[in-house]
Image (cartoon, coloured by chain):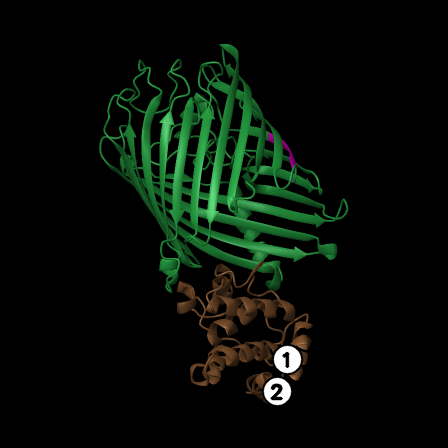
Chain colours: A brown, B green
Amino acid sequence: MDKHLVLLLLLAVGLAPKLPAQSNQLLDRIMAEDELRFGSALYLVVSAGSAIYRTDEFDIAAALRRVRHRITIQTYDPITLGQYAFVLQEFFDLPEGMWYRLLAGPRYAARDLAHAEIIQGRAYPAMPLSGRRAVHILGRALMHMEGNL
Amino acid sequence: MTRVRRCVFLPAALAGMLMIVAHAPAQQLDWGGTFDSATNLRDDPSREDTVFQQSFRLGLWAEVFAELRDERTVRFTAEGSYRLEYDEDDDDHPLHVLNPDLLRLRASFPLVFGPGSTLDFTAGRFRFGEPTGAIWNHPGDGLSVEARLPRVWVQVAGAYTGLLLNPVSDIRMTQTDLEEEDDTDELFGPRRAIGRLQLQLPELIGRQRLTGFGIVQVDLRDPDDGEETLDTQYVGLRLDGPVEPVRGLYYEVFGARGFGTFNEEGNGDTSVSSGLYGARVRYFRERLRYSRLFAEWLHASGGDALDPFVAINAPAAGFAFSPDLANLMLATAGYSLRPFSDSASAAAAGLQAGITARGYFRSTTKDVFFDAPGVDADSDSRYAGAEGELRLASRPTADLGFAFTSAVFFPNDDLFADSDPWYRGRFELSIGL
């Protein structure tokens, strides 16, 4: 795992609850990204996961290993909608379809989240994803887990 | 002999889909497949025993979306399918159909006529419709242009139906159309040109919408001796919207007049004038387990003051019993809900259960025209019978769905020679690939 990613994840787990001002600045910067980077996506997902799961329920390393096993992407590479959906699926408890259980990956992750109305609008797996849309999708994923969607 | 239907457009559709997949940037492309199965059991007087029918459909689709400058968008969608149908009544002749179901190019140009306006173009093979849903709702090859201005929406559409495969076409307006339906020598369905002009006032008063439309349908065939053609025109109005202040309650009323000319080769022209009227009410309450309550009244003229109504293609009036939409008054009421919407299981939470009751009446007894097997031509009864339907459906995941529909029709023994109930059951399975 590259050191930038480690730093981002440490920030996500440690910084967000303790230094909200810095965390908000980082969130603003991520929302301004026209093409969300993989590292930024992980920061969003791990921050949200750290806030809602107990430490022993949220195995970041295992989820990251599953993501890395399926997609080859570097920290500063743009992430597609499907890859982001896949990251959400692997980190959170979200609805999984028949094909996702057999062939987990970005294609069926995007389908499943669109079906659950977590992703709204067009949901082509390979389409680029802005930071603003990623935050919107993350918000709807959290709503879904709370049973409010 | 196995009946095989191939369409000359299928290679074009496949080539188009391959070109899309090969040349479109990956980020603007999506594709997939579907597998659908439908199993039917029917028991009615037109058959000696309960009949088993099975159909499978394997579909492939691709879509390309491009966003141009000034929020203008272009979207191309192609879908082709292979369908296999087996009918126990005709077990030596399973039907195979290869068909390009959809070849649609859509372009949208917002703000062309100023703020709040949009201009949309749709071209290719796609489904055409009209506001009542009971006159024309069918695929065709053509063009549709729609201009949406803040106060008025204008739509012009034109379609040709002669390139649709015969087993795919549901346009059966004349006896000649019906005779061609099972004719394996006919590759394509009835050749007709259909045009529609529609004006809509989207906010007449509050959120009430008023829609006016006119449809012209021209039969393009050259009839042989004894064959008939039918040209028709329809004009209609529809008013719909929410019933304030009751949240979730919506209504719809519509009326349409049809005019036409039958031409039977050798017997000259016959003019006809008909009518179709309807009202629908729907009530939706999400908090009460997604409850939906609906009622509908449909009146299609018979042979009294007006001639029998002839739709371009009519929707199914019922499930076990589904007469043509002519000389018919149909009262429908239904209720559906998701009984386990609180369940943690997606399959249980998404399960929708519904019941529907239908009452069938003839508009007039003066004309015996009432499309059903076993009708007593001398009967003066208007009431034809009642149908009860039960439906269970669920799509627990994005790629799996199923539905079970069962209905029983109880014919009125004053009108039907045989009063035994009719039955139909259907199980559908749908898998996204």
* Magenta highlight range: B195-202
Q: Is residue B312 magenta?
A: no
Q: Is residue B199 magenta?
A: yes
Placement of B197 over or under B248, stated as above or below = above
Q: Secondary structure at mark 2?
A: helix
Q: Earlier in the sequence, mark 2 or mark 1?
A: 2
Placement of A91 over or under B433, stated as above or below = below
Marks 2 & 1, CB-CB < 8 Å contact:
yes
Q: Amino acid at mark 2?
A: His
Residue under the image location 61 percent in, 34 percent down: B211
**Subunit under mark 1:** A
Q: For residue B62, which numbered disc appears in the image?
A: none
Q: Looking at the image, can residue B222 be seen?
A: no
Q: Nearer the viewer, residue A132 or A81?
A: A132
Identify the residue at the far front of this view: B245
Q: Position of residue A63 (x, y in %)?
A: 47, 80
Placement of B32 over or under B95, stated as above or below = below
Q: Nearer the viewer, residue A90 or B28?
A: A90
Question: Do marks 2 and 1 share a chain?
Answer: yes
Residue under the image location 58 percent in, 66 percent down: A126
Q: Nearer the viewer, residue A44 or A102?
A: A44
The residue singled out by tag 2 in the image is A4
**Subunit under mark 2:** A
The residue singled out by tag 1 in the image is A76
Label 1 packing within 10 angstroms: few (<14), some (14-19), many (20+): few
Q: Looking at the image, can residue B288 be seen?
A: yes
Q: Position of residue A32 (x, y in %)?
A: 69, 72
- Left or right position of B418 against B170: left
Q: Amino acid at mark 1?
A: Tyr
